[in-house]
Amino acid sequence: QVQLVESGGGLVQPGGSLRLSCAASGGIFSLNAMGWYRQGPGKQRELVAGITHEGSTNYVDSVKGRFTISRDNAKKTVYLQMNTLKPEDTAVYYCFAESDGGGPVWREYWGQGTQVTVSS
């Protein structure tokens, strides 16, 4: 069973930076796309950024130029560098990963979420 463990959330002032990490573990398995969703107070969950195994990336318009997604395939870890944070970035951030779980079926796995609060 693939497990995703996130770290790096917290409280930061507007204009500040945070780096989220998400490490996948749980035996021998393959990973395809990885990325981050977020859900702010009273909002629907939205895809923030995604990255393929080969490194192609995509971002929601509201974070382009401020956030950077990257991954280390050897460490089975995805990162989200968040700069110039705004109060509207406040949300619970969830990591996801497409994996075969070591078997024949591919599915999405999710982390437990990490809180990011941008406030002065």
Image (cartoon, rainbow, N blue to C red):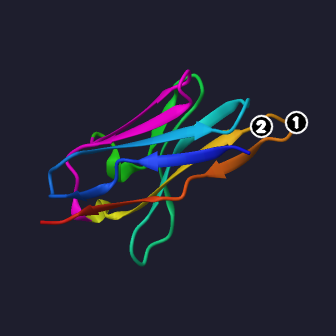
Q: Which residues are magenta?
A: 66-87
Residue 70 to residue 117: above or below: above
Residue named by callout 2? 100
Residue 13 to residue 3: above or below: below
Dot 1, how many residues are within 10 Å of its Cα: few (below 14), some (14-19), or many (20+)? few
Kind of residue sitting beneath label 2: Asp
Q: Please name the residue shown 57% across and 22% down the image.
A: 54
Count the marks: how many?
A: 2
Residue 51 x %, y %: 52, 34
Kind of residue sitting beneath label 1: Pro
Q: Residue furthest front?
A: 27
Magenta span has 79? yes
Q: Please name the residue shown 49% across and 59% down the image.
A: 46
Residue 18 x %, y %: 27, 46
Q: Please name the residue shown 12% across and 66% down the image.
A: 120
Magenta span has 56? no
Q: Is residue 119 left or right of residue 27?
A: left
Q: Is residue 116 left or right of residue 118?
A: right
Residue 31 x %, y %: 66, 32
Check whether the beta carbons of the residues at disc 2 and disc 1 lie within 8 A of each other. Answer: yes
Residue named by callout 1? 104
Residue 98 to residue 92: above or below: above
